[in-house]
Every structure is written in C-alpha cells, then in structure tokens.
C-alpha cells in the first residue's frame, strides 16, 4: 500500500526563462489533481520540510485565485499567490505564481498530469514573464539563466570534480 | 554599460549562449584541449568573438589555458560549475521532500477510494489482478 518514494524530482532549465520540474507518482491522475488542488490536502504536502502551511485558499476556476501561506521553520512567513488562466480537470492547469516577497515578478506555471498504467507523471513548467525579471533572478544569484539541461552540466561537473 | 557582472562568477559567465557552446565543444571533444582555431572552426564564430568569450571563461576559471609553441590551448575546468549544480540540487531536494509528502497523501486517497467503491466494483478490481482479463 505504501507509495513508491524512491524517485526524486527532476529539475531542468530548458531555456533562459524556464524551470521544468518532473516527478512520477504511484497514483492515477485524478487523485494527483485532487491532492494538488484541494486546500486541506495542499496543507499536508506543499511546505515540504520547510515549515507549516497555515493558509491554503483555492478558487479553482478560470479567473479564480489561489494563495498559500507557510510559516517557515525559521519563524518567518512566506506567501505565494496566483490566478488560474486555464483549468482542464485531471489534465492541465495554467496559473500565475507570485512570491509575495517579490511582487513584481510574475511567473506562469503550466502543470500537466499524464497517466500511464495507473501512475502519473507530473510536470511543472515555470515560465518567467520577462527578461527583466529573469535578470533580477540572475542578479540575486538564484537563477543560472542557462539553456542546456542540468543533467548535462551535472555530467560535466561530476566528471571534472 | 556596466559589464562587471559577466565576469564575477560562473552563473553569469554561462548565461551567455555562445559561452555555453564553447564549454559544450570543450566538454564533448575527444581531445582534452582545443586551440582557438579549432574552436573557431567548430563554432563557426569569428576568431575575435571566440577569443572574447574565452577571456571571460578564463576569468571565472571555467577554462584553463596553456601555451604550446605559437598556439594557445584551452581546456575545460568544471569546478566553477559546482555552485550552479549545487543550487539546482538544492531546488531539486526541496521539491523532492514536498513530493514525498504528496506521496503519503496520494496513498491515503487511493486507499479511501478503494474503500468507498461499491462492493461489486471492488470485487471486479480484485479479479482483474487475478485473471489478467481486465477489459472493462
């Protein structure tokens, strides 16, 4: 009954303005979609081990908004919000994402749910809105603005360590 | 134009696509070292442009250079890529932890769904595993 937890998230940087996160789950896509969009369930996983989700609001309709607030282990609050642009139940969600600490930087997230043999591959494509915001990230040291996949760099870094 | 940022660290140095191309050529080439002329030929860029990018790569330590007669030979040094790799790994770990908690939620949802299913349906699911004839 225990879900397979051995597969880890794969993060790649497909272009200068994008981040792509991929992960497979041992559950059909309607359940992954449910866990992704239901506030009580979001509260149980979204913070990872960084803290506790204290607010999860989801108005799941086009034009509706979502907002998550987490109390980080260090004590401060971190909040994100966005607006849904597209909702295809159990298939695809397109929404904006704003980190409230950097309210001018809007990203657009495209989340897809693909099922095969009862397992679901989840992909999250984070598209930064503009070169300006991407450069903001570059300057903050958070974003590498690279085109090749990280796996390539990983190989290079490992082989030359 | 403020240009200081390009040479401060590997993050900025590899933000330029052509510099990544140079690194790719050096990383995938059979020979450990390449001369400027070989890089010019492989990349179809002008020699001054290649030299300019090589200078930036050298300043952040991503390439090492050695004189061999009248040629300057360049080789890749991957060490400065480590902070980039580490950054992405941190990000990846963060998502992995989040997804591990999502796994737990999903396992519960699956169990709940099975329990809530009509007895007939539940039986059908059981026999699916047994006889392999699972056409609905």
Image: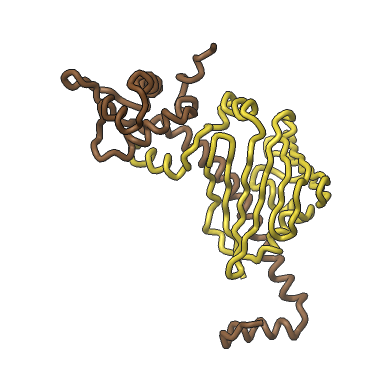
- Note whether residue B59 is visible: no
Position of residue A110 relative to residue B119, above or below, is above
Outermost residue, left direction?
A: B69
- Note whether residue A73 is visible: yes
Residue appearing at x 58%, y 39% in the figure = A18
Front in this rendered view, residue A14 or B42? B42
Q: Which chain is brown?
A: B
The quadrant in which the N terminus of chain B is found is top right
Residue appearing at x 76%, y 40% in the figure = A81
Residue appearing at x 57%, y 45% in the figure = A20
The quadrant in which the C terminus of chain B is found is bottom right
Position of residue B73 relative to residue A27, above or below, is above
Whether residue B67 sits left or right of residue A29 in the image: it is left
Whether residue A106 sits left or right of residue B26 in the image: it is right
The chosen color scheme is by chain
In the rendering, what colour is chain A?
A: yellow
Q: Position of residue A104 (x, y in %)?
A: 73, 28
């Amino acid at each position: 009954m225990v879900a397979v937890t051995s597969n880890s998230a794969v993060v790649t940087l497909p272009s200068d303005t994008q981040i792509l996160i991929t992960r497979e789950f041992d559950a059909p896509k309607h359940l992954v979609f449910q866990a992704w969009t239901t506030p009580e369930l979001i509260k149980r996983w979204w913070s990872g081990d960084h803290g506790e989700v204290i607010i999860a609001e989801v108005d799941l309709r086009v034009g509706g908004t979502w907002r998550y607030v987490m109390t980080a282990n260090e004590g401060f609050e971190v909040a994100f919000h966005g607006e849904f642009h597209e909702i295809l139940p159990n298939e695809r969600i397109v929404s904006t994402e704003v980190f409230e600490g950097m309210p001018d930087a809007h990203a657009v997230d495209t989340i897809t749910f693909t099922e095969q043999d009862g397992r679901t591959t989840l992909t999250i494509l984070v598209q930064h809105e503009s070169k300006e915001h991407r450069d903001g990230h570059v300057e903050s040291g958070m974003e590498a603005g690279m085109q090749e996949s990280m796996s390539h760099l990983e190989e290079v870094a490992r082989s030359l360590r | 134009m403020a240009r200081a940022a390009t040479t401060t660290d590997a993050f900025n140095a590899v933000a330029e696509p052509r510099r990544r191309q140079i690194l790719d050529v050096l990383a995938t080439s059979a020979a450990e070292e390449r001369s400027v002329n070989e890089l010019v030929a492989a990349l179809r860029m002008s020699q001054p442009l290649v030299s300019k990018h090589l200078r930036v790569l050298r300043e952040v330590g991503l390439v090492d250079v050695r004189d061999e007669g009248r040629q300057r030979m360049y080789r890749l040094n991957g060490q400065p890529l480590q902070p980039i790799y580490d950054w992405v790994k941190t990000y990846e770990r963060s998502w992995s932890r989040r997804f591990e908690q999502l796994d737990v939620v999903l396992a519960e949802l699956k169990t709940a769904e099975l329990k809530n299913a009509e007895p007939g349906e539940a039986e059908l699911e059981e026999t699916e595993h047994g006889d392999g004839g699972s056409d609905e």
